[in-house]
Amino acid sequence: MSKSSRRPNREAIKEQRCYKKSQEKALRERQKAEGLVPRKPPALPNTCSSYTAKTEEQREREEAVTGQLCILRRELPKLLQQLVKISDPRDPIKRKHNLTLLLLYGMLMFVFQFSSQRKVNKVMTRPQFMGNLPQFFPELERLPHADTLFRLLRDIDIEHIAQTHADLIRRLIRNKKFRRFLINNCHPIAIDGSQKFARDTLWDENPLQRTHGKGEKSHTQYYVYVLEASLSFRNGMVIPLLSEFLEYAKGDTDNNKQDCEQRAFHRLSARLKQLFPNLPIILLLDGLYANGPVMDRCRQLNWQFMIVLKDKDLPSVWDEFNGLKPLQPKNQLEQPWGIVGNASLGSMTLNTSIPGRENANA
């Protein structure tokens, strides 16, 4: 017998829509009564292109490319000076491209956001692309094959490349390039994990494993999971810093437990502190890290932190909060969101009780 569907029927969906519209209407009336004006996002223009000629469009595209190349040309010489110090693991007799050219070629793959090696071979070998690229990068007289770069990265010492990347970030921080994006004079660093790929066969001893299905239809799947730390600024710019791979052997093998994000966080935080010992940092974490050991770790390293606390996280804290809330009805934080006069404040008003603070109004 098949299971009953959990998806709501058409009548239930209509009721949910009606309820949502009624709540939105009540919120608008409340805002209007309090003198708040909701902030509306700017509408997309419904006009035709403003370019009047091909030369005008070409000139604007060239200005955009030139602006990006100015940054690359300013930082690239210092970066290449460090990359040339890395030992080349290839056979000297079979080399057709030097090490710095291959690494520069690899950086361009990420700059142009190619999704695969085949896409790189298909696009970067086009006649027009090959004609334009040497004008900006004279070092690339002849482009290598993407498989050549793959074989190099397979055998090279990745730690040297990671150290070169860290030195570049340290140089940008020293030159105060991110000063206007700081939070409480701290550099915001987001830490989160992501799965890269999964396979049904075990190709290495390090991947994690999980079981799909039940009974005879169950099968084991092996996957690669990485914990990544990145500079995340409010303008949407994200700059990767460090990556920590989760490995099966680094878990609690005695109790048959694999590696997890909590364990990888402590390893990643130690590496981050070693690379940037005096950098003021504020960590941006999701609800998985809402626990005592992570907070103690941040305090030990003198880092600030912002952690998302959902309703299902730390239930004992929520029970204490809900128990103290009726005992202190005046202990509230009122935060208006909207536009009052000439002040821009958001779009709604929130009243939130906060235990331990009396008569706190903002």
Image (spheres, helix red, strand yellow):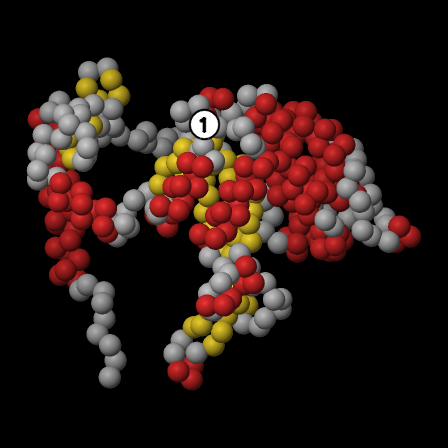
Which quarter of the figure is the C terminus placed in?
top left
| Nearer to me, 98 or 45 | 98
Is residue 97 something one can see in this rendering? yes
Label 1: few (<14), some (14–19) or many (≥20) C-alpha neighbours in 10 Å: some
Residue 333 seen in the figure = no
Q: Is 357 left, or right, of 91 in this rendering?
A: left
Instruction: Give left or right: position of 30 versus 173.
Output: left
Q: Is residue 217 left or right of residue 8?
A: right
Local SS, label 1: loop
Q: Nearer the viewer, residue 164 or 249?
A: 249
The residue lying toward the viewer, choosing from 300 and 305, is: 300
Which residue is situated farthest in the top direction here?
342
Please give the name of the residue rendered at 55% of the width and 49% of the height, measured from the top-left corner.
244
Image coordinates for residue 148, horizontal then vertical, percent:
76, 53
Q: Residue furthest right?
A: 93
Residue 64 percent across, percent down from the top left: 58, 27
Q: In which quadrant of the rendered image does the N terminus lie?
A: bottom left
Residue at x 74%, y 54% (from the top left corner): 155
**Quarter-of-image position of residue 215:** bottom left
The picture places residue 243, in percent across and down from the top left corner, at: 56, 47
User: Image point 65% across, 32% down: which residue?
Assistant: 167
Q: Quadrant of residue 190?
A: top left
Which residue is pictured at 86% across the width and 53% down the height? Answer: 91
Q: Nearer the viewer, residue 272 or 22?
A: 272
Residue type of the residue flagged with mark 1: Cys
Percent of width and height locating residue 158: 68, 48
Q: Which residue is mark 1?
A: 186
Vertical position of residue 17 compared to residue 208: above or below:
above
